[in-house]
Image (cartoon, coloured by chain):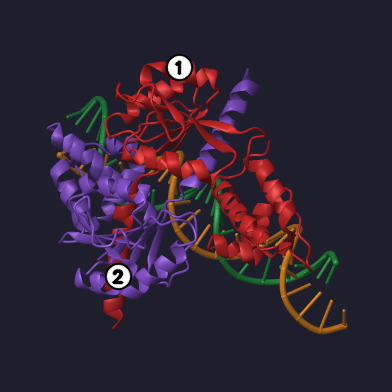
Chain colours: A purple, B red, C orange, D green
DNA sequence: TAGATTGTTAATCGATTAACAATC
DNA sequence: TAGATTGTTAATCGATTAACAATC
């Protein structure tokens, strides 16, 4: 299995999204600059990405849509559906559960964990909710290797540790808290507070630039 | 106003979070390597970041916590509270509304917009909900320059256009859809589908690496 | 002083960009 | 052929890393 850079992986995911839209619209082939728009990048970069996963284009027609979707899927996806765990069933957790339900056929949330004993045993959005203590058994039983972490600040590190010990190898972390995990666990932070601060900063820059240019 | 790189801005936001925790614990000063842990970076990088915003440390005690928090806040924050709009009041939108309510004193969601006429006029989590057509008036009236976009796929581009025209200069986009906006609008994408795909890919890499090493 | 830390400079690395040849 | 696109190589850029001097 080849290993591409993280940026390339991100872009491949975005390309595929556009390709599916194109396919839905009956388009048979795309040019690199069509895909470049999707990632606000250059056509040359797109071609390099596609070459990395062994896709060749045609100087007359560009790239074959079906071929590309297949190649990206083979690269990004597992053969089987990847079972995912969600930890934390607050407002955000429930929203994520609903969000991911419909967004990906190959990634499926199959178990939900929460500290609250009241939630244990209940079924939320079609998912059985387990207590944190049941994690080792459930994760092993369902062969879960990926988790979405949507617990409140302060609880994230502990939950991450439990996930790691249970055998999870990738965590999508929504808590604004850095996770200390071993090198065999990939962590992707979705730090919404940081992102909003950043946007607010850049918006202010844009605003003062505009006013300054007047 | 100085302009730092996007990465530096992100890290400053993270440093501040750790500093506030340290301050809460009664700590008066920190070393660069304390902060480095927060961003999984190096101490030298932290020092460079802090120098960029004009902070000097002391080779004996490191950096003064209060001093650092003030300097970062002066750099990142506006003097006043920044009014923020939320567009899209589905499950995710409501979760975000609740999330941001408590997470930042300087960023406050002051208006909520939704297409659904049933939601118009209602108050959700203490926020008045407006119809999309009211956007120009409300955004101008409340001097909103930052927006959080949590609408379903397909509606994002149109909403972004309306926001731009209303005067918004920064958008935090949760829709898995690229936004075409002018250069005066900063867009930060929180692409949860892409992030989960990426984590799943990296988890699989870790897994096969482990099994291969056996 | 000795030791840990900060501040500064040069070297390295990776990714992006630009330029151009090859192709249909 | 002509023209737009792909594939490939070299140049550029930015950020990170490493090394070391300065400081308390």
Q: Position of residue B70 (x, y in %)?
A: 71, 47
Q: Is residue A128 above or below residue B171?
A: below
**Secondary structure beneath label 1:** helix
Q: CA distance from mark 1 to mark 2?
A: 49 Å
Q: Is residue A95 above or below residue D2?
A: below
Q: Are marks 1 and 2 on the same chain?
A: no
- The quadrant of the picture occupied by the C terminus of chain B is bottom left
What number is the disc on residue A135?
Answer: 2
**Secondary structure beneath label 2:** helix
Q: Position of residue A16 (x, y in %)?
A: 24, 45
Considering every residue shown, the one lying at the far front of the view is A118
- Give the side of residue B71 with respect to residue A69, left or right: right
Question: Which residue is more in the foreground, A155 or D14?
Answer: A155
- Give the side of residue A211 with respect to residue A197, left or right: right
The answer to whether residue B115 is seen in the rendering is yes
Question: Which residue is more in the foreground, D7 or B177?
Answer: B177
Q: Is residue A46 above or below residue A139?
A: above
Q: Position of residue B88 (x, y in %)?
A: 35, 31
The answer to whether residue A47 is seen in the rendering is no
Q: Chain of mark 1?
A: B
Q: Tell me the residue that label 1 is attached to.
A: B136
Q: Which quarter of the picture shows residue A74? A: bottom left
- Give the side of residue B104 with respect to residue C7, left or right: left
Residue displayed at 38% across by 55% down: A150
Residue displayed at 50% across by 46% down: A193
Q: Residues within 10 Å of mark 1 (few under 14, many from 20)?
A: some
Q: Which quarter of the picture shows residue C3? A: bottom right
Q: Chain of mark 2?
A: A
């Amino acid at each position: 299995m080849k290993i591409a850079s993280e940026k390339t992986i991100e872009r491949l995911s975005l390309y595929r999204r556009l390709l599916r839209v194109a396919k839905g619209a009956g388009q048979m082939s795309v040019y690199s600059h069509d895909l470049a728009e999707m990632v606000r990048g250059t056509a040359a970069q797109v071609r390099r990405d596609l070459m990395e996963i062994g896709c060749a284009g045609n100087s007359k027609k560009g790239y074959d849509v079906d071929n590309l979707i297949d190649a990206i899927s083979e690269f990004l996806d597992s053969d089987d559906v990847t079972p995912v765990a969600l930890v934390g069933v607050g407002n955000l957790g429930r929203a994520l559960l609903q969000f991911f339900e419909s967004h990906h056929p190959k990634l499926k949330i199959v178990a939900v964990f929460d500290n609250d004993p009241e939630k244990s045993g209940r079924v939320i959005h079609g998912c059985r909710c387990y207590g944190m203590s049941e994690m080792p058994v459930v994760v092993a039983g369902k062969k879960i290797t990926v988790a979405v972490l949507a617990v409140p600040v302060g609880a994230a590190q502990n939950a991450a540790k439990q996930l790691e010990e249970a055998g999870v190898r990738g965590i999508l972390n929504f808590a604004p808290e850095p996770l200390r995990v071993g090198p065999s666990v990939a962590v992707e932070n979705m730090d919404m507070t940081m992102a909003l601060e950043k946007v607010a900063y850049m918006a202010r820059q844009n605003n003062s630039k505009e006013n300054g240019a007047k």
